[in-house]
Image (tube, rainbow, N blue to C red):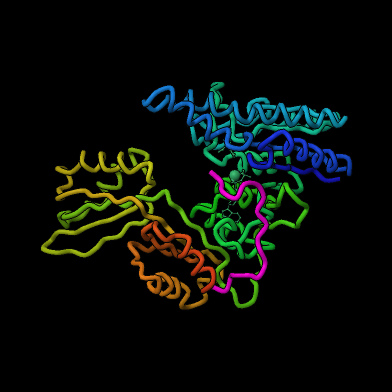
Amino acid sequence: MSLKVMKFGGSSVGDPERMKRVASRIVETQRAGDQCVVVVSAMGDTTDDLIDLTKQISDVAPPAREMDMLLTTGEQVSVALLSMAIHSLGQSVVSYTGWQAGMYTEAVHGKARITDIQPKRIFDALEQGNVVIVAGFQGMTEDGEITTLGRGGSDTTAVALAAAIKADVCEIFTDVDGIYSTDPRVVKCARKLPEITYDEMLELANLGAAVLHPRAVEYAKNYNVLLVVRSSFNHNAGTNVKEEAAMEQGIVVRGIASDKNVARISILGVAEKPGQLAKVFTALAAAQIDVDIIVQSGVLNGLADFSFTVALSDKERAVRVLEGIQSEVGFREVTSQENLVKVSIVGAGMVSTPGVAAKMFEVISELGLSINMVSTSEIKTSCVIDSGRLNEVIQALHTAYGLDTDQQAFVGGPAERR
Ligand code: ADP
Ligand code: ASP
Ligand code: MG
């Protein structure tokens, strides 16, 4: 008998029929002798629909607390309905909200981190032979305030729970049948990976591969949780995310990811003297703005230009912060640019293989595109380029690194996702 955490994402429970199929799968697993703790997301596009509703209420950004009050309802609907579906199959079952399940978080609305899990109630319910269902994406602060973990955060609920209850495995059921070399909705002949390391998956997730929430991977790595990504639509073997993973011969790039949530900010004509960069980035940090790639583009007559990237959603705020310190730092102007994308290649073997980054630059330039910014680490190279021909770039890189296969990837649910 093993203790399993099974997480089902929004598209896997998108309508009552899918919900019933998921219920049958859970009951089959429980009856085969496993103990199941199930984490579930809001149905289909519910979270997006709730966000759209807030825009119809007011143009003013809603208070973060009330946003969390609203968004957590999506998962509450799912847990109750899934519980009813399981009950109708004659299986004893109980559903819990995040707070009932003992998920404590820091007091940050919209992207709280989990601080503690007190799973006593879960263990008691399991002991009584129940399937236990827990609402993903939500928690509670010590003061009893409701929080959410950030978009896609149900993955993190599942992995954190798996670590807390010492589950044998955490299975993430989604609408593709594993982790692929790139988004199989973009490249139809993407390569399904039998396994991938925590570090590589963490890079891919941070660099935009939506299939797993980055914090979920972080948790899995820190607590050594065996994480399996597989399909809720079939029984195909999925992808194991673990400490070490074999690399197929002749392949150095494990995966390609892209992120459209990128804006470039440039500060032009900065007087060159010590401490200037520190002032700029301290001001941005104080405003909770994360800065990603930073480039200094030459010095002329004692004046330097700097460019860096921030999330698109932070662009306006970043420009305002910089304008606020313009006279103190002493620079000529701030400019910003949208319609960019960061495309990245990831692979643990890159560090010991010369020419991997060079090939990326070559492929992009052969498409007649210029590269605005570059950043590298031991296991990844990222390029910021104009967003217009992104899919073409991803396909060309995929081919150039020998990742194409002659099989069509399995993609369940609607062809286009919102
Ligand atoms: P869920 O609703 O189950 O949480 P998500 O939409 O969050 O599902 O994640 C699954 C989606 O991630 C897939 O439909 C796929 O389009 C996308 N995706 C992006 N990169 C990858 C990748 N490298 N491998 C597999 N899927 C990917
Ligand atoms: N429902 C939330 C979202 O859409 C959390 C999740 O699906 O993981 O972001
Ligand atoms: Mg997801």
> Does residue 199 appear anywhere in the picture?
no
Query: In front: 190, or 126?
Result: 190
Query: From the image, which quarter does the N terminus lie in?
Result: top right
Q: Quadrant of residue 74?
A: top right
Query: Does residue 347 appear anywhere in the picture?
Result: yes
Q: Outermost residue toward the left?
A: 301
Question: Is the stretch drawn in magenta largely helix, strand or loop?
Answer: loop
Q: Which quadrant of the structure image shows residue 320?
A: top left
Above or below residue 353? Residue 410 is above
Of residues 403 and 323, the one nearer the viewer is 403
Locate ligand 2 by image quadrant: top right
> Where 169 falls versus 154 (above or below)?
below
* Relative depth, front residue between 240 and 60: 60
- Residue sitting at x 73%, y 48%: 233
In x, y percent, where is residue 237?
Answer: 75, 57
Residue 403 shown in magenta = yes
Total labels drawn: 0
Across and down, in percent, residue 42 comes to 62, 34
Residue 374: horizontal and vertical position, in percent?
A: 37, 64
Q: Is residue 278 magenta?
A: no
Q: Specify the segment rendered in magenta.
A: 401-418
Q: Position of residue 403 (x, y in %)?
A: 58, 70
Q: In percent of the image, x 36 and y 25: which residue is there?
A: 60
Q: Judge left or right: residue 9 versus residue 148.
A: right
